[in-house]
Amino acid sequence: MATEPRLEHQTFKVKQLVEDYRAGRIVIPEFQREYVWRYSKLRA
């Protein structure tokens, strides 16, 4: 019987995510790289 994927909640600091991205430890899928949020959808 196949095991279902297990989802976990994790909290990361933005600084750590940027460092991990720059170091190649995480990647952003191609389809998300060019996405730009509309100004009306941004929150401060």
Image (tube, helix red, strand yellow):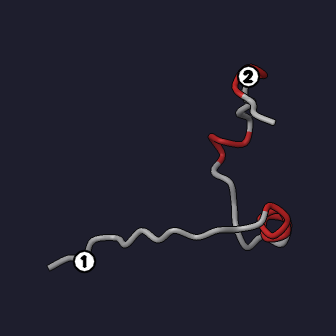
Q: Is residue 37 above or below residue 24?
A: above
**Image location of residue 11, percent across then percent down:** 64, 68
Mark 1 residue crowding within 10 angstroms, few (<14) / some (14–19) / many (20+): few
| Vertical order, 8 against 29 (above or below) | below
33 relative to 22 in the view: left or right:
left
What's the residue type where badge 2 is placed? Arg
Residue type at mark 1: give it.
Thr
Secondary element at image label 1: loop
Please, what secondary structure does the residue beneath circle 2 have? loop
Q: Quadrant of the C terminus?
A: top right
Residue 4 occupies quadrant: bottom left
Does residue 32 sit above or below 9 in this rendering? above
Residue at the image position 74 percent from the left and 35 percent from the top:
34
| Image quadrant where residue 37 sits | top right
Q: Residue at x 20, y 76 (%)?
A: 2
Q: Is residue 41 above or below residue 33?
A: above
- Closer to the chain start, of discs 1 and 2, is 1
| Camera-side residue of 44 and 37 | 44
How packed mark 2 is, by other alpha carbons closer than 10 Å (few <14, some 14-19, many 20 or more), is: few
Residue that badge 1 annotates: 3
Residue 38 location, x and y as percent? 73, 22
Question: Residue beneath label 2, please?
Answer: 38
Q: Name the image quarter holding residue 7.
A: bottom left
Circle 1 or circle 2, nearest the eye: 2
The disc at residue 37 is none
The answer to the question of whether label 1 and label 2 lie on touching residues, with beta carbons closer than 8 A, is: no
Residue at point 78%, 22% (across, down): 39
